[in-house]
Amino acid sequence: MPVLLEGLADRLYQACFGWVSRWPQTALLLLTLVCLLPFSGKAFHADDTLFIRAAQQITKHPLDPYGFRIVWYEYEKPMSRVTQNPPLASYYLALVGAVAGWSERALHLGFLLPALGVVLGTYRLALRLTQRPLLAAAATALTPGFLVSATNVMCDVMMLGFFLLATVFWMDGLDEPGNSVNLAVSSLLITVCALTKYFGIALIPLLLVYSLVRKRRLGGWIGFLLIPIVLLGAYELWSRGLYGHGLLSYGLYYTRGVRRQEREILTPLGHAVVGLAFAGGCTLPHEPQKCVASSLALHDQHSHVVTGLWPVRTGRSPV
């Protein structure tokens, strides 16, 4: 009897969920939509306003995204002094708003695309690093931090999507020494990632370390890591000429203030515990290069957790 029941349960499972293993990406797409669509009418809140105002400015003056003043922190200030994020997410918002309108539902539906990119990008990266890529991607989609961030119209989820795609293309490019297309695409994605949120710059040293561990020597791939540096330098000069200060350097200056707050909130032991909590089992891989690759997402996640504590002490949110 138990054997009969076990066989029946197995057939029932295959009938209900067997398609998931056959079409994992479709299953992940549906899971993400089920989790996020109910919140497509969510009211704008927190820093959503900054991104929307910049997007509306872009529709009028495409090459001057922050050329207006806004009341923030109880004072009217130039937008270029208020926001500490690059404008790429606002350019995407401007496109969505111009096509579908500026309602909550329209903009949230537009931001489903970056969310799907994160989940499917996690699946693609996990194919290289684990035997359970579906589980890894599903866990990402169900992470509370992701669900909260994916129901706003800020830049975090979009940056993470580009972060994952750049990593995947870079790893594929290293596996094909004679084909530099993937490395070129990755270098552009690194730039796009950093112009979505400055944390994306972390990809440059992280992929450098990964490549050195993987290849054991410098190679022609190093040139592709210089492309984002040159392009970000051009962005800094452009913004300095437009607003009187470089947006990239100003954002880094602001980050130093955040780090001072971190030292007040967390002790060195606290930082170590948070880092180990995020590292988890990835600290014990079978191959050293997989340890480096697994750590790629650690820097961004740790930064968001710590900066997420900022309002606890200051009542202000780092933009």
Image: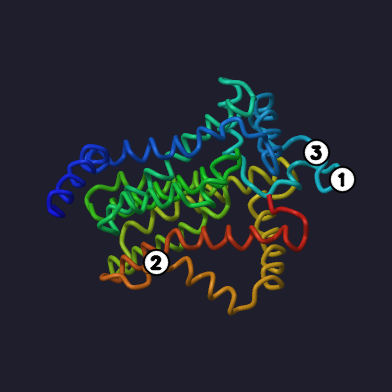
Image quadrant of residue 306?
Answer: bottom right
Residue annotated with mark 1: 75
Horizontal arrangement in the rendering, residue 278 relative to residue 132 (left or right): right
Near-viewer residue (117 or 177): 117
**From the viewer's perspective, is the residue at label 2 or at label 3 nearer?**
3
* x, y percent for residue 127: 28, 52
User: What amino acid type should be assigned to the residue bearing mark 2?
Assistant: Val
Q: Secondary structure at mark 1?
A: strand
Residue plotted at (58% across, 43% down): 155
Residue plotted at (80% across, 37% down): 69
Near-viewer residue (33 or 293): 33
Q: How many marks?
A: 3
Residue annotated with mark 2: 209
Give the number of the disc on residue 70: 3
Near-viewer residue (11 or 215): 11
Q: Is residue 12 above or below residue 229?
A: above
Tag 2 near tag 1, CB within 8 Å: no
Q: Secondary structure at mark 3?
A: strand
Q: Mark 1 or mark 3: which comes first in sequence?
A: 3
**From the viewer's perspective, is the residue at label 2 or at label 1 nearer?**
1
* x, y percent for residue 130: 28, 59
- Categorize mark 2 by other alpha carbons within 10 Å: few (<14), some (14-19), many (20+): some
- Categorize mark 1 by other alpha carbons within 10 Å: few (<14), some (14-19), many (20+): few
* x, y percent for residue 260: 71, 69
Residue plotted at (40% across, 60% down): 207
Q: Secondary structure at mark 2?
A: helix
